[in-house]
Image (spheres, helix red, strand yellow):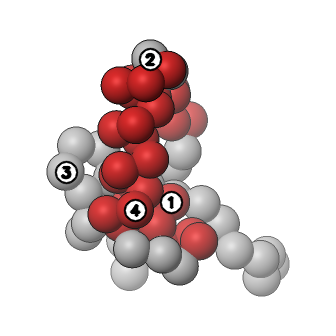
Amino acid sequence: METGKRLYRSRTVKSLAGVCGGIAAYFNIDVTIVRLIWALGALLWGTGLLAYIVAAFVIPLEPEV
């Protein structure tokens, strides 16, 4: 049985796929901060959108309670 922290996409805090909500829960920070970082990545470097799409497919959905 694993006792470590796991990264999941959020089922409750989501706008699109729940990636930002899951990352915010994992690092215990506000979801708005994570969303701003993704937006800056998309606008400034162009990699934010691609990274979000990849993360939506790679990060598993949070298990139902």
Callout 4: SS: helix
Q: Is 19 or 8 nearer to us in this picture?
A: 19
Q: Residues within 10 Å of mark 2 (few under 14, many from 20)?
A: few
**Which of these two is toward me, 24 or 62?**
24
For label 4, the residue is: 33
Q: Element at badge 3? A: loop
At 25% from the left and 68% from the top, the residue drawn is 12
**Residue identified by numbered label 2:** 46
Q: Nearer the viewer, residue 13 or 27?
A: 27
Residue 38's tag is: none
Name the residue tied to disc 3. Answer: 15
Check the picture and name the quadrant holding the N terminus: bottom right
Amino acid beneath label 3: Ser
Give how far apart the Cα atoms at labels 2 and 3 are: 20 Å
Q: Position of residue 53 (x, y in %)?
A: 41, 26
Q: Disc 4 marks which amino acid?
A: Ile
Mark 4 and 1 residues: CB-CB less than 8 Å, in contact?
no
User: What is the spatial separation of the Cα atoms under label 3 and label 4, in whole angstroms?
Assistant: 14 Å
Position of 6 relative to 20 (above/below): below
Assign a secondary structure to mark 1: helix
Mark 2, secondary structure of its residue: loop
Q: Earlier in the sequence, mark 4 or mark 2?
A: 4
For residue 23, the mark is 1
- Residue at mark 4 to residue at mark 2: CA–CA distance: 18 Å
Residue at x 46% of width, y 32% of height:
41
Mark nearest the camera among 3 and 4 is 4
Badge 3 vs badge 1, beta-carbon distance below 8 Å: no
Could you give the CA–CA distance between mark 4 and mark 1, rounded to whole angstroms? 10 Å
Residue 13 in the image: above or below residue 51: below
Q: Is residue 6 left or right of residue 32?
A: right
3D distance between C-alphas at marks 3 and 1? 13 Å
Amino acid of disc 1: Ile
